[in-house]
Structures are given as structure tokens and as C-alpha cells.
Image (tube, helix red, strand yellow):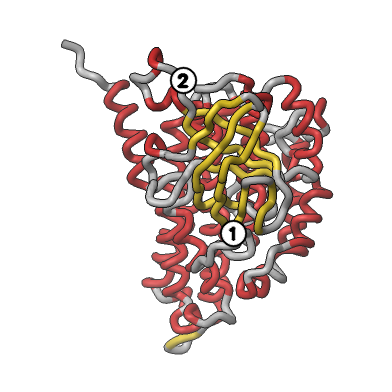
Amino acid sequence: MPRLCETEGLTDIQTEILGAVRSFVEKEILPVATELEHADEYPTEIVEGLKELGIFGLMIPEEYGGLGESLLTYALAVEEIARGWMSVSGVINTHFIVAYMLMQHGTPAQKEKYLPKMATGEVRGSFSMSEPGLGSDVAAIKTKAVANDDGYAITGQKMWLTNGGSSTLIALLVKTDEGPDVADSVYKNMTTFLIEKEPGFGEVAPGLTIPGKIEKMGYKGVDTTEAIFENHQVSADQVLGGETGKGFYQMMDGVEVGRVNVSARAVGVANRAFELAIAYAQQRETFGKPIAQHQAILFQLAEMATKVEAAHAMMVRAARIKDRGERNDVEAGMSKFLAAEYCNEVVQQSFRIHGGYGYSKEYEIERLYREAAFLLIGEGTAEIQKMIIGRSLLKDYKLKS
């Protein structure tokens, strides 16, 4: 029995859920992942299987048709799925962030309208903050919602929407004019809107166009898109929580759990890279013995396993803090930073252990090598995480005069 990524203190229900997910990954994802990834093909059958498992509603409360599980359960499920194919966990992540934002900040009517259908996967979510040329500077967004007699007209261009084509509900961050009393803070002039649309590409709602998939070096299968708004009309009851000016804080709450998700993905990818390396090292022989018996390779395997375990432990801690109802911005940032960096290091070590075969598309490590790079930037770069961590530490350890 593999000893990496074991989590203490799980309930019988959590253990049963994770066992079912792992079995699904082994039977339905790993055998087809590389073929689908190379073809950049959307994993329709896999997604349908995850719907049947209840993964789309894993954290949605039972009163809305979900399983009502914790962030920890969700993160551990994501870790298992990413071990099979990281793109599949991306299909779930943005959906989950939108559902979480609705759970935490939605009006009763919004929860009743969307959460039951999100739990089954009938409504699929994506969320959108970034814009072309924006990078990590969320405060500089230009997409704007202007109030009118029918609600709001939204105009602007958004970038990097995961599930932009396949989703039917977008949590969209835009600028709104909240008046001179809050003009001192740009963050109070932002609002999250719930945008309904048809799945697919082209004009998916009046005044809303999804041009097509963005071609990427990795993270294939899942659709990543732009979104162009041209006087897209939306009613006032589509403001998340029913109150404008709260959007930035709602989005940051969602991003915190998203960072736990990305941490879990990184652990899953790293764990798979380690599994491939230790298996290959016992089969490949040089100088009359398996390369695993050469000290240079043995030391690398030990380092890889230690990094996987450390990243897993930090991810679990970040999830448990959020589950206690506490803010986990620092812990989520630390977890995402460490897990993404270690994932890339472990994948590179596995790639080197495979030698020339690692460069061949016939071997799975080639796919992991391209996937790992995404985790360095998804849900905020390492530099953003370090800014969040560092500023908080200065507050906690401020010198007393």
C-alpha cells in the first residue's frame, strides 16, 4: 500500500468518498488521459462520470442536493483526480469556486436558483477576474457595469476563463461606480455579477461573445477562453449577494479556496510523477543493476517523496483552517507556493530519471512536465503568494515601540 499522501483523522464517509474517487481515477482517467490530452479533447465521458459520483456537489449543502462535505474532503478528492489528469481537476475547480461564492455570499433566492443545479452539474460555473494586459493587478480591471433603467450594461474584455466555453454561469468581477464616499478605495468600486449564458463558442448571450479556445502548451482538454462584453444587459438581481461594491472581497474569498485546490492539484501531479519515477527506476538497468540501486537515483527518489509529503501536509492544514471558519490567506498562499514549486521540482527529477524516454510522448511524464508549469501561475504566481505571506507576517511580528 503506498504510504505517501495519507491523511490522519478522516471519517468513514470521507474515506469511502476518496476510495471511490481513486477507483474512478484508476479505471476511467489514467488509461485515457494522455491520449485525450495529446488530442486536446474535452473529457466528456469523464465529466459525466464525476457528475454521477456527486463530485460537482461535493461541498454544496444537502438542502440544495449536494453532499455537504468539507473543503478538506474536496481538496483530497482533487488531489486524487489531478494524479490522474490535472485538466480534469480544472474542470471542477472554477465550478466549485462559483458554488462556494454563492454558498458564502449569495442571496437566498440566488442559492435556491443555482445551487441545486450546480450540485448535479446541470449548471456549470466559471469565474473571471483577469483581463488582457492586467496580470496580477486586479485593481486595474477596466470592464465596467453601468447602471440603467433595466439593471446594468456590461462592457469590457476578460481573459483566462477556465471552462469559459463549457460553463453556463460566470461569476464576473467588474468595476461599478459606488460614488464619492468610497472613491478612496478602488476595491470598494468592484462588484461580482452572475452572468448566465449558453455553453459553446461565439455569441453565447446577447452582447457576450466567447471567441474560442486559447491554445496552450499544457492544461489541455479543458477549455480556456476570453470573454468579450459589449453592452451586455443584466438585471440588478444578478449582483452576487444583492449589494454592489462587495465584489473584490467576494472574489478573494473564492480565490483562497481556489488556492487550496491548486495546491491539491500540485500534490496530485507530484505524487504521480514520483510513482512513475520509482517504477521506472526499478525496471531500467544500467551497469548490470536497476538504476534505483544507484545512490544518485536513490537520493533523488528520497527527495521527491519528502517534497510530496511536505506539500500534502501544508495543503491539508490550509483546508482544515478554512473548514474551521477562519481566514486562511497566509496558509493557502504558503501551501500554493510550496506545492507548486515542489511539484515542478519533483516532475523535473522524474523527467531526468526517465532519461531520453521522458522526452517521448509515449511516456506519461512528458505530459506531466507540461502540466506542472501551469501550477506555477494558476491562482496567483509565487511572487503574489510571497507578497500576501510577507505582508501578513509583518503585521503579526510588528515591533512594539
**Quarter the C terminus occupies:** top left
**Residue 306 is at least partly visible in this image:** no
Q: In the current view of this chain or complex, which residue is farthest to the left?
A: 401
What amino acid is found at the position of numbered circle 1 in the picture?
Pro
Whether 294 is drawn above or below 76: the answer is below
Which residue occupies 42% across, 67% down? 348
- Residue identifier under label 2: 178
Which image quadrant is residue 110 in?
top right
Say which element carries label 2: loop
Q: Which amino acid does label 2 sit on?
A: Glu
Q: Please name the residue that numbered disc 1 is placed on.
A: 211
Crowdedness near tag 1: few (<14), some (14–19) or many (≥20) residues, C-alpha within 10 Å: some
Does 125 sit above or below residue 286? above
User: Does residue 228 appear left or right of residue 388 in this picture?
Assistant: right
Quarter holding residue 221: bottom right
Q: Is residue 210 left or right of residue 114?
A: left
